[in-house]
Each structure stands twice: as C-alpha cells, then as structure tokens.
Image (cartoon, rainbow, N blue to C red):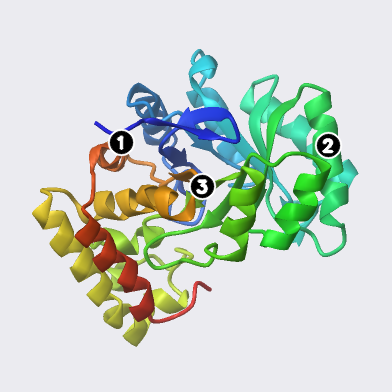
Amino acid sequence: MTDRTVSLGGWQTSAEGLGCFGMSSAYGAADWDESVATIRRALDLGVTLIDTANSYGIGHNEVLVGRAITGRRDEVQLATKAGMDFSSGRLELRADPAYLKAACDASLLRLGTDHIDLYYLHRVSPGTPVEDSVAALADLVKAGKVSHLGLSEVTGDQLRVAHAVHPITAVQSEYSLWTRDPEGTLTDAARQLGAGLVAYSPLGRGFLTGTLDVTSLADNDFRRPLPRFSGAAAEANTAITAAVREIAAAHDATPAQVAIAWVRAQSGRLGIPVVPIPGTKRVRWLEENAAAMDLALTGGDLMTLDALADIVVGGRY
C-alpha cells in the first residue's frame, strides 16, 4: 500500500481528493442522494480532501457538500474557491477584496462550517492585482475563517507575487496525461516556494477512462464542443486511451486508475507534492478511483505514459 497522505506546505491531506464540480453542473442532471453518498463513501476510504467552489451550481454544490459532511467535519480537509461570479447571469471574474470577503462568509454559511481549510482564488481578475486579492484572503486567515490559501490556474509569476503577500499552500490546475500545461515555470515556482499542485481533471474529463462515448454526450454536456472531444480529434485521441488500456491490463487495473496513478507519480519528477482530485457523483467510480492510491507504475510504464502528451490532438478549450 502506498502513502495515503501528503503534505502541502506543511498541511496534511489525503493523497487523493474528490472533485465535486460534476455533482452540480456540466455533466448532466444532478443526483443529490447519490452525490451525498459518494462524499461520505470517500471519507470512509480515506479520500478526505473534498473540493468545491461557490460557482459550482451557483452555490448548490457547497450546500450539498456541507450536508454530506455534517457530523464528520473533523475528518475533512475542506477546499472551496471564489472568483468566478455568475450572479449576473453570465461569468464575471471577481477578485476585489470586498467581493472575496463577502463570498467567504456566504460559503461558510452554505457549507455549514466556521472555517475553510483551503481557500482558493478561483481565477485572477484582470481588474484586480493578484497581490490585492491575496491580501484580502490573508485577512480571512487572520480572522480565523480560513486556514490555508491557494490559487487556481495561475502562472509562475503570479504565484511568486501572491506568495510574497502570504504563503500559498497549493495551486490548482488542470493536469493529466494529456494536459501538461503547469509543467515548467509554474511547477518550478511551486517547488521553490514550497507549494503543492492539486490536479483537477486527472481523467481528462472522462476521456482517459476509455469508457466515454463522445457521440452520446448530452446536448447540455459542456464537453461536446471541446476540441479534443470532437470529430477527427476525438478519433485520433483514442490512440491515447489504447496505450493506457494496455498498461492497465498488465496491472489488472482500469485505465482510470492508471491515469490517476500517473498523476501521483509526477511528484518525484517535479519535486512537489501532486494530489489528483478526480471528480465523480457515483459511488462505484469513487471506489475505483480511490483504489488508484495502491497502484504503483513501473519505470517503463511511466516512460510510455509520459510520451502520450506529444500525440494529443486538439486544445483544452
């Protein structure tokens, strides 16, 4: 059995987390009861980093997470975010101090807790210097409402500027076998500053599981228009899932477990802790994903998987 906890800037959390985004939006109809059962089962399995945001379902997801962890708050490393505001009916990037402080209070109310373990700036806003946003978040730490700060989808330079105001525990970015964008300046800065990487969409929004039929996605599934999921690009990218499937068969594992295990294994190469947070609203997939914590890939496996990024067809968006 591999280690099931990691240290992010001195903060102990589970080696794998649960992303809750899809429980409230983007991947079809919500299923409240199954989602709550999934979060509770995650805690049973030692998957205790629970990741949400105030924008997921425009508040719905935080309420769901709060209900799910009722009576078990002390088992959870609770992460949420603010900075993507849909209150006007369209997306606005908001990172001004007044907004962030009000958003934190609203999140605490929806989550039913008196503190947030890890609070992310969801996106840097063009209208507010990142150092001003982080100064506001630092005030929340001083007030005891937040324990640790994070940033999502930032550059290495933005991380350095933010860290000069207040230590940043984690950066959250999309990171997987077919999305390697954080590598380089961001991971270099994280290593130098002592921050960890929390990897969302480690399963490539489901594509890397090898079970997704892109032609059957619902009309309201946000993946339908994404370049990698469309037409000839989707067909070409099946070469990636074929390679993952072959390695999975050699380990009597699933492609999803291989994809998650690859992300975890990058911690040694990058020199920073890397925590994948695969998302699901189903207990069966949660259990499969959690089992990836016990999968150790060989050096040969990693070399094969490392090369797959070079054959990806299509951009993220």
**SS assignment at label 2:** helix
Name which of mark 1 and mark 2 comes first in the sequence.
2
Q: Is residue 80 above or below residue 189?
A: above
* Left or right: where 69 falls relative to 177: right
Q: Foreground: 144 or 25?
A: 144
Is residue 90 something one can see in this rendering?
A: no
* Left or right: where 259 falls relative to 116: left
Badge 2: residue crowd in 10 Å (few <14, some 14–19, many ≥20): some
Is residue 130 something one can see in this rendering?
A: yes
Residue 106 placed where, x, y %?
A: 75, 33
**SS assignment at label 3:** loop
Name which of mark 2 and mark 3 comes first in the sequence.
2
Amino acid at dot 2: Lys
* Left or right: where 76 falls relative to 210: right
The residue pinned by badge 1 equals 283
- Locate the N terminus by quadrant: top left
Q: Is residue 23 above or below residue 112?
A: below
The residue under the point 59% across, 58% down is: 188
Amino acid at dot 1: Val
* Left or right: where 234 falls relative to 129: left
Badge 1: residue crowd in 10 Å (few <14, some 14–19, many ≥20): some
The residue pinned by badge 3 equals 272
**SS assignment at label 1:** helix
The residue pinned by badge 2 equals 101
Q: Is residue 98 above or below residue 2?
A: below
Residue 193 placed where, x, y %?
A: 66, 46
